[in-house]
Image (cartoon, rainbow, N blue to C red):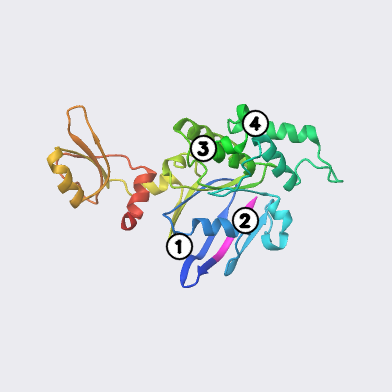
């Protein structure tokens, strides 16, 4: 299974949203990281054919052979796609199970050759999806009564209808509490062994340990692409924890890139600092995280 994106570009007037984006994706999770305006949503909308690129081609093959242009595949490609947009549209008066059944009908999931729905199969499919996103207990509740996090989980269930080969998720954990985020993250990791999963997120910690590769986008251009461990290795020796008196915090913030401030039991301030050199004698080098790397790359837009 290979999704190949070759030299895809897109502009809005004079603004370049994507410039010669190329990537070869195989089963596994790909984190798409970058600030607002970096081109993440544009790329996802081009892959899903919600937006036309200015140039470039996207091909897909479910084997090892040469891929076929996804635009020429048309419906055959869209049947392999599951897409969760950042702001999914829903019908508030639908009940959760009813909404998923409606989406099954639209996707022609569980229909026989005459288009008739196989109720037993569809019911089982819907129940398993609701269980996976922890919404079984509200299956018959109206969407209008759902919190933002519940709607987010229902949108994920909708994207998973039909067991798609390619899953594209835009901010899938937005609005979820820590327990739900971990549950959804683990579920995505579990099903990604035989799917190509693209996750665009600002919650970098959600993808650090599950992503096969992280694609770093800046103003529509790939600035780096590697496994998270490979990216964090690049800034080893540049991440420090500085112990400081409260009176020194402001001056340290002016002198260095401070990414976090906490306190120890003695009342000292602990500053996490990105610096090419050791800030002072009260500094200790620490293991970088993917978030540290992200902040290092995008220091100019913080």
Separation of disc 1 and disc 3 at Cα? 31 Å
Q: Which residue is mark 3?
A: 149
Residue at 17% from the left image edge and 33% from the top image edge: 268
- Mark 4 or 1, nearer chain start: 4
Q: Are marks 4 and 2 in contact (CB under 8 Å)?
A: no
Q: Would you call the spot at circle 4 few (<14 residues within 10 Å), some (14-19), or many (20 or more)?
A: many
SS label for mark 4: loop
Q: Nearer the viewer, mark 1 or mark 3?
A: 3
SS label for mark 3: helix
Where is 42 relative to 190, above or below?
below
- Mark 3 or 2, nearer chain start: 2
Separation of disc 3 and disc 2 at Cα? 24 Å
Indicate yes or no whether the magenta region holds residue 169.
no
Write down the quadrant of residue 134 in the picture. top right
Q: Residue furthest right?
A: 114
- Mark 1 or 3, nearer chain start: 3
Separation of disc 4 and disc 3 at Cα? 15 Å
* 87 or 70: nearer the viewer: 87
Separation of disc 4 and disc 2 at Cα? 28 Å
Quadrant containing the C terminus is: bottom left
Q: Which residue is mark 4?
A: 139
Would residue 221 appear left or right of 103 to someone viewing this image? left
Q: Which residue is mark 2?
A: 48
* 1 or 54: nearer the viewer: 54
Where is 67 relative to 192, above or below?
below
Q: Are marks 1 and 3 in contact (CB under 8 Å)?
A: no
Q: Which mark is residue 221?
A: 1
- Mark 4 or 3, nearer chain start: 4
């Amino acid at each position: 299974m290979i999704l190949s994106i070759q030299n895809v570009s897109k502009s809005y007037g004079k603004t370049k949203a994507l410039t010669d984006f190329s990537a070869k994706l195989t089963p596994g999770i790909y984190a798409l990281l970058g600030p607002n305006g970096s081109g993440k949503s544009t790329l996802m909308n081009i892959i899903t054919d919600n937006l036309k690129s200015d140039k470039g081609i996207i091909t897909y093959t479910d084997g090892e052979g040469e891929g076929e242009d996804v635009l020429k595949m048309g419906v055959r490609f869209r049947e392999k796609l599951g897409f969760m947009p950042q702001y999914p549209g829903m019908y508030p008066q639908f009940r959760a199970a009813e909404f998923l059944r409606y989406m099954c009908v639209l996707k022609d999931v569980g229909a026989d050759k005459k288009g008739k729905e196989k109720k037993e199969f569809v019911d089982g499919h819907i129940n398993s999806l609701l269980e996976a996103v922890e919404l079984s207990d509200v299956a018959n509740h109206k969407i209008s009564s759902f919190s933002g996090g519940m709607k987010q989980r229902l949108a994920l269930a909708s994207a998973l209808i039909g067991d798609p080969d390619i899953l594209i998720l835009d901010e899938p954990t937005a609005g979820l509490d820590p327990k739900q985020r971990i549950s959804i993250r683990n579920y995505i990791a579990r099903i990604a062994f035989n799917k190509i999963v693209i996750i665009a997120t600002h919650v970098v910690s959600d993808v650090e340990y599950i992503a096969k590769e992280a694609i770093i986008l800046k103003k529509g251009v790939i600035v780096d692409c590697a496994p998270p461990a490979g990216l964090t290795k690049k800034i080893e020796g540049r991440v420090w924890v500085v112990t400081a008196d409260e009176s020194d915090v402001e001056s340290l913030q002016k002198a260095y890139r401070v990414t976090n401030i906490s306190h120890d039991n003695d009342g000292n301030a602990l500053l996490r600092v990105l610096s090419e050199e050791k800030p002072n004698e009260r500094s200790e080098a620490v293991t970088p995280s993917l978030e540290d790397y992200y902040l290092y790359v995008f220091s100019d837009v913080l």
